[in-house]
Image (spheres, helix red, strand yellow):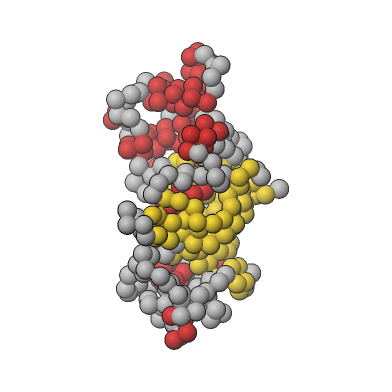
Amino acid sequence: MTLFEVEQLSLHYLTRFGEKIHAVTDVSFTMKKGEILGIAGESGCGKSTLVNGLMGLFIPPLYPTDGIVKVAGESLMNRTPEDIRKNVLSRKVSMIPQGAFNALNPTRKIKDIAADVIAAHMKDIDRKAIHTRLRERFDLFGMNTEKVLNSYPIQLTAGERQRSVIGISTLLNPRMVIADEPTSALDVSTQKIVIKMIFNLLEKEIFSTMIFITHELPLLRHVADTIAIMYAGEFVELGTAEQIIFDPRHPYTKALMGAMLSAEAGQKQKKPTAIEGAPPNLAKPITGCRFAERCPVAKPQCHHTKQNMRIIADRQVRCEYAQ
């Protein structure tokens, strides 16, 4: 059964001058229960905008241009922000933010922040039942539960804050969790703890499936089943983790892997090579391939011909000339 379905989703920002900036274009994928999709790409490629679209958060100046987003068959399109907040967020789709410290109210204890999430969605639950639920959930995280729940964010380590945010984000057992670079501010040992914790929650079916967004592409090999590479608002390659990491086919995926340090066998001796140039200005119309100006193998027609996804070596690639 398809749990999460995205079909030809396109999103745009509307400027105060009435101009449309097409930040996400023609994104499609499906996910089944238990699957983890990794999304990687440069800063500014549209990952955060896509996250808002996947949660149904179309708050001006962000608007949907076209497409469908469904969770367990239920559409998230054409719904008010209030409806999304009450009936979708935390229950069906939840987000683990990148900056745990910024996501937590510094003037409130963890137990009070978490209790507000439960009380907002479960009107008939009393405070005692709320705190019982909190202790049971936080006991799964390998922390001193009472200490963490009774602490202010500033009193916790970075790892404890991140695990607290994950706990709060999954309190209502959402169907889908979107993790936006949840390990980027952590040291390697704490990253391992946090990732193990996320997998533990997935195994216990506290949530059913996950999208994991990161700049650390090699990390996705150990986290994701499938990886999508995003560039200038589009998915340019979508395949299994092994395919993307060890056998990339799109020129941008190859360049992205070549620009990263990796400890993988056969990769760690390679010297990183920067990707020359800059992404295109999405405020201006783009008629051809969005990577053409930076692509080392671009042909003249690439600058004028729109590229569509096609199947190459059992994965989807947005390049007419990839082999």
Seen at 38% across and 49% down, the residue is 61
| Nearer the observer, 251 or 74 | 74
Residue 72 location in percent, x, y? 65, 43
Residue 70 horizontal/vertical position (percent): 61, 47
Give whichever of 286, 97 is nearer the camera.
286
Left or right of 35, for residue 154: left
Residue 290 seen in this snapshot: yes
- 312 left or right, relative to 83: right
Total marks in image = 0
- Place residue 47 in its image quadrant: bottom left
Q: Is 146 placed above or below 198 here?
A: above
Q: Residue at x 37, y 60 (%)?
A: 19
Image quadrant for the C terminus?
A: bottom right
Residue at image coords 32%, 70% = 278
Quadrant for residue 207, please give it.
top right
Establish if 243 lies above or below 31.
below
**Residue 274 seen in render:** no
Residue at the farthest front position: 18
Percent position of residue 289, x then y: 46, 75
Considering every residue shown, the one lying at the far right of the view is 1
Q: Residue at x 42, y 72 (%)?
A: 286
- Seen in the picture, residue 321 relative to 3 is either above or below; the reply is below
Residue 145: image location, x then y, percent = 44, 24
In the image, is residue 34 above or below residue 119? below
